[in-house]
Image (cartoon, rainbow, N blue to C red):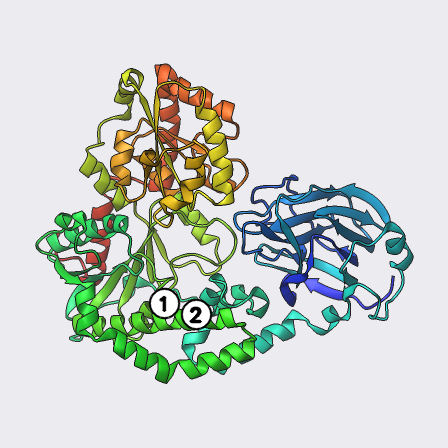
Amino acid sequence: MTGESIIFTGKERINIASLLKDLTNTFTYEFWIKPSAEHQIDREAVVGISGTCGQRYVVFPGHGKQENEAGIGISIGNNGISVYEHTVNHLPATLVHLFLIKNWTHIALVYKNKTPFLYINGEFVKKGLATTKETLYASGVFGGSKYGYFIGELREPRVWSYARTPAEIKEEMNKSLTGSEAGLYIYNELKNNRIDGTRKNMETILNKYPVFIKENIDLLYRWGIINESQSLNLKDHYKMNLSRNTLETYTFQNEWYLTDVLFMFGCYRKDYEYLLFPVANRLAEKGVSVHVIIHDKSSPNLNMLSKKVNILFYDNLLREYNTHKKANKFFNSNMLRYLDEFSNEMGLNASQKKRLQVFYRIYAIDKVFTTNLLAKLRPKCVYSIHFILNPGCINAIKATRYPVKCFLIQHGLINPDSSGNHDFRGADLVFLWGEYFNSILKEKVNAPNTKVIGNPKIEQIRFDIKENSDFLSMPKTMKEKEPLIILYIFTGSPKQGYNTKNLALFFKGISPINNIEVIYKLHPTSSLDDCQNYIRQGHMEQSQIIKDGNTYGLMKQADIIVGDFSTSIFEAAALNKPVIQIFQDNYSEKFIKFTHVKFPEELTKIINQLRGDQKYFYDFMVNQQKTLFDLFNTIDGSTERIASYIDKLINGEGKSK
């Protein structure tokens, strides 16, 4: 063993590149290692997500970005080694070997035709599982990242562009190299690229530019506009920018304020109206001054709004403020020069430069629009969905002469991984549906202030479709009704990998069942074209596929709801419908809250029992109901609780007692 030790204390990393795109499917990692902490042991698999916590990544698995491309990673603790691969909804351990590491140990991981082979101290010990992906890349981030940092020492790290032979590994493991050996891809680079220097350099770079770049660096990373290897340590960035104001101590006693609450969507979707409109109505009934921005003039939900609510149409305001012309001028005069300089300094390619400019053109539109809107209304607070696609809105809200508080309402499931990513940046307070989601959000470094309040959307839908009757009255309806109606709800596109796998199980599971009718509800972001392959194969008929229909009307019509981790699955359970989740280790297990199946035979059996066995149905629904409080708190009264909290905050004891 030769060379100096590189010491990792659990916060360092060495960035060469997220993915080493020159090294595909066949390559070799070698190093001497002495870990000082254990890592979490996951079971071997070729699908699923398991490497998100408790890991000690000597090599962090870069994200493949495409479903059929993945980066590999190596986690090592003093209790063993695990090899992972990482891409969209995919982070399984393809090789796991438990052994005790007390002293310096030589590790060689050889990838040959997408299959990992492990050598310890020059001896072959294990063959891992071959990937299901078309392309595997070597990864170039050493020391860890958001899912776990290595703790220990590293010597003589080497990456080769070919599969090293056992003889080569054993012969050269105790020798220093010149750096000019054939096929040697990385050697001295690690010694010259310590992350502590990279982090300092990144902060120096960001401090040279206006705040609109630095404050959005996490989103530029999240949307893939800048690469991981070009980014600063985001956990440090989150901590640096985290604000925790105590809302209850703030008073709005100032003549600057003209109105009370402005409801704006940020990200608009028609079903999000159920999260805003009921609360707007209740506040207006309390005598609070309420304005709501309307994006869709034809939405049938407009009938839901009280006449006491002031309605403003988004398109009309855009024209009134001459938003696009002003935003274009602002972008060209105040942003473009800095973005060009930043792009060049960060080494962005042509595609990244274009996406960066698109991001900030939208930012300029949102900033100009929101600035004019706030200047006109001067509200005490804004109530919205989220602004991760509209960071210019947050910038405008935080730049008002007097504070305008930002309340956000949970709109979907919260990603349970340990990164800082969530959809509530800029919020002074987030209203959450249930304690389950609160526990997930609190684990994130940049967790905002939260209040568990319930779900006003489900409360309103329950009222609209009159599903307040006790679920125990449903067995007779299901048993006698022919045909049995099954609603399958998609998360994302039907062409995505986890959906194709789940659909294959579903098709096989329902094939032995007679007298059924299946309805497929597409996610709002997908289209009928995504289903053409299934239609050609005879698995679906076009008449079965619903793109824009009312999801909740379909739920009312259906007898059983089937899906994966769609928010609609959770909502269906709250609407007293039996739900079955298909789970094949292809998304986070933390999303499994209800009865789930991994095999077609399980699905067949459960559907038949729900249909024909009244006691089974009763027990099934009892178990399902037990989960709901943790997810949605007490649903009834959610709207009133939110409205009362806001009213009391902005008006002392509130305008209505």
- Residue at 20% x, 74% y is 321
Amino acid type of the residue tagged 1 in the rendering: Pro
* Picture coordinates of residue 521, whole percent (x, y): 34, 39
> Pointers 1 and 2 in contact (CB under 8 A)?
yes
Relative to the observer, which residue lies in front, 200 or 505?
Answer: 505
Splitting the image into 4 quarters, where does residue 386 fall? bottom left
Mark 2 nearby-residue class (10 Å; few <14, some 14–19, many ≥20) = some
Q: Which residue is mark 2?
A: 216
- For numbered disc 1, what is the local secondary structure? helix
* Picture coordinates of residue 366, whole percent (x, y): 30, 69
Look at the picture and state if 334 lies above or below 433: below
Q: Which residue is mark 1?
A: 391
Query: Residue 91, which numbered label?
Result: none
- Residue at 61% x, 47% y is 133
Relative to the observer, which residue lies in front, 466 or 182?
Answer: 182
* Picture coordinates of residue 149, whole percent (x, y): 64, 58
Relative to the observer, which residue lies in front, 380 or 421?
Answer: 421
